Image: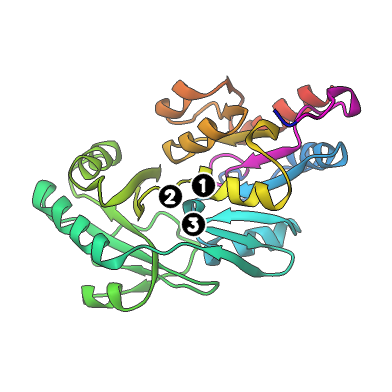
């Protein structure tokens, strides 16, 4: 345990970790005033707030800027620790492209052709979208490619795969079965199955960010909605799933709150603040 005295503060955690999409953000991409106020109250009570998202930094920083967020953010499914106030990438883990190519070949040998996208490393890393790939973040920028060689020409954070017939859960299960010894596989949202550096999760990135703040898992309450949040829930002292979260996450959550549209984060924080 952290050794803190609960009597010192009305709020029992020193770190609040929140996913973005489906958790902190509403469907229109905004954060409600109620949730902003609840997070501000938790921080005033001594907690730090860390955003933990599957989005890489280029797809995250504009949101953080709009929120006036200046702390640390864990991006790229745990692969990047980003200082929002300084607009600086503190750590970054890249995908071994040789292993990723082998993993992709094994997956396609098992399930047939997949639609492919890739996230390049860095503060300004492009997201490359291949033929047939269904974009689910229409407001985000991406670069089309037709020659798959372009994917492997620069360092990558991760690959995204989709299938014409298999569901996200079925594709993730098949990919894990045939390539799980080469890459990490996670499902981060509708149409978002990702191939990551082996062993990389939101928990590994969050633990690095927390360590920079002198905090531990025992200090942490985490909020999320998708299977990619499962490792973060396993690491944190308390995991809270949103009402419409994926069943796999609900199964391991310590608590289920209201949806992101109904201020689920604020509901829990207000109760804990008393």
Question: Which of marks 1 and 3 precedes in the sequence?
Answer: 3
Q: Is residue 96 above or below residue 124?
A: above
Question: Residue 204's mark?
Answer: 1
- Quadrant position of the N terminus in the picture: top right
Give the residue drawn at x 50%, y 56%: 55
Rounded to the nearest whole Å, what is the CA distance between mark 3 and mark 1?
8 Å
Residue contact at pointers 2 and 1, CB within 8 angstroms: yes
**Residue identified by numbered label 3:** 79
SS type, badge 2 = loop
Question: Residue 200's mark?
Answer: 2
Q: What percent of the width, then of the height, locates residue 193?
A: 33, 48
Q: Is residue 194 above or below residue 36?
A: below
Residue contact at pointers 2 and 3, CB within 8 angstroms: yes
Viewer-side residue, 263 vs 268: 268
- The stretch in magenta equals 3-24
Q: What percent of the width, then of the height, locates residue 10?
A: 87, 26
| Other-residue count near label 2 (Cα within 10 Å), few / some / many at <14 / 14–19 / ≥20 | many
Q: What percent of the width, then of the height, locates residue 115?
A: 23, 58
Q: Quadrant of residue 129?
A: bottom left
Q: Is residue 15 magenta?
A: yes
| Other-residue count near label 1 (Cα within 10 Å), few / some / many at <14 / 14–19 / ≥20 | some
| Other-residue count near label 3 (Cα within 10 Å), few / some / many at <14 / 14–19 / ≥20 | many
Q: How many tags in the picture?
A: 3
Rounded to the nearest whole Å, what is the CA distance between mark 2 and mark 3?
7 Å
Q: What percent of the width, then of the height, locates residue 78?
A: 51, 52
Instruction: Give the residue at the far right of this rendering.
Output: 8
Q: Is residue 204 above or below residue 247?
A: below
Q: Is residue 116 above or below residue 230?
A: below
Give the residue drawn at x 53%, y 37%: 232
Q: Is residue 132 visible?
A: no
Q: Quadrant of residue 157?
A: bottom left
């Amino acid at each position: 345990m952290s050794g803190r005295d609960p009597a010192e503060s009305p709020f029992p955690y020193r770190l609040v970790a929140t996913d973005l999409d489906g958790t902190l953000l509403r469907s229109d991409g905004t954060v409600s005033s109620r949730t902003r106020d609840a997070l501000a109250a938790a921080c005033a009570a001594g907690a730090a707030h860390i955003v933990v998202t599957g989005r890489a930094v280029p797809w995250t920083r504009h949101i953080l800027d709009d929120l006036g967020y200046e702390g640390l953010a864990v991006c790229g499914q745990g692969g990047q620790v980003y200082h929002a106030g300084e607009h600086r990438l503190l750590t970054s883990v890249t995908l071994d492209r040789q292993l990723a190519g082998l993993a992709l070949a094994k997956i396609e040998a098992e399930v047939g052709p997949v639609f492919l996208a890739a996230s390049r490393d860095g503060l300004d890393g492009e997201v490359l979208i291949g033929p047939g790939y269904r974009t689910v973040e229409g407001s985000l920028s991406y670069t089309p490619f037709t020659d798959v060689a372009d994917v492997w020409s620069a360092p990558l954070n991760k690959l995204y795969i989709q299938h014409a017939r298999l569901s996200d859960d079925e594709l993730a299960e098949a990919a894990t079965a045939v390539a799980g010894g080469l890459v990490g596989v996670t499902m981060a949202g509708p149409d978002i199955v990702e191939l990551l550096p082996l062993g990389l999760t939101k928990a590994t990135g969050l633990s690095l960010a927390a360590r920079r703040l002198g905090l531990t898992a025992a200090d942490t309450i985490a909020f999320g909605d998708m299977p990619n949040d499962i490792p973060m829930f396993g690491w944190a002292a308390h995991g809270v799933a949103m009402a419409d979260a994926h069943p796999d996450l609900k199964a391991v959550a310590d608590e289920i709150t209201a949806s992101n549209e109904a201020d689920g984060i604020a509901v829990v924080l207000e109760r804990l603040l008393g």
